[in-house]
Image: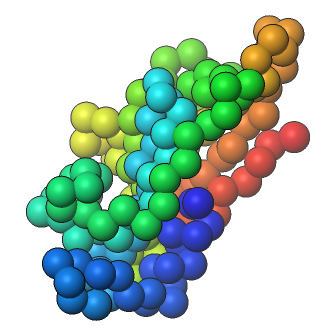
Amino acid sequence: MIKTARNYAVTSRMAYDGGELSVPPEGYGIYINSNTGEFILFANVGSDPNAYDGSNDDVIEEEYTLPNNTVFEDMLSDSCDGSSGVDEVVIIFRPPLADASIIDGVGDTMNTLYMRLSRAGSPAGVYKCIHMNRTAGFPEIDL
């Protein structure tokens, strides 16, 4: 979904906003909630260009919830091995160059994002880490 949001911003993909078809001036974003395992791809047309304004303002393109056998351990800003993370993050890509912003649930900008995921029942310390750097805007899976 992160790659899709970036691609939508780069290609200036149009979205329906109030029955009108147009390119969202604030691009496309991903809302991620680590407590629920929810990922929402949205056209960023709401009142706050740096937040997910929900389905009342922003246009939801796609929703995904992690399966029950996947545990969303944490979202962190320093490394995948850190211990103090955030519950919500919004990643926004603005056209035409897909400039990326990573904003945590309290509105602070993050330079990097690490998402730590594991399988239910996995031994402690066994996880996969998805890393995203704001400058590059590409997610990478650390193996």
Could you tell whether 110 is left or right of 67 in the image?
A: left
Q: Left or right of 123: which side holds 90? A: left
Q: Is residue 3 left or right of residue 118?
A: left
Question: Which residue appears at 67% of the width and 33% of the height?
Answer: 67
Quadrant where the N terminus lies?
bottom right
Where 4 sits versus 128, above or below? below
Q: Is residue 126 above or below residue 90?
A: above
Q: Residue 124, image x and y in percent?
A: 80, 9
Residue 57 visible in image: yes
Residue furthest left as drawn = 47
Give the image location of residue 138, x and y in percent. 64, 63
Give percent across and percent down for residue 54.
25, 51
Tell me if I can see residue 96 in this picture. no
**Residue 14 position by quadrant:** bottom left
Check the image and tell me how it is coloured: rainbow
Q: Is residue 126 above or below residue 60?
A: above
State the residue in front, 114 or 26: 26
Residue that appears at 44% across and 87% down: 13
Quarter of the figure that contains the C terminus: top right
Q: Nearer the viewer, residue 18 or 73?
A: 18
13 vs 120: above or below: below
How many labels sit on residues? 0
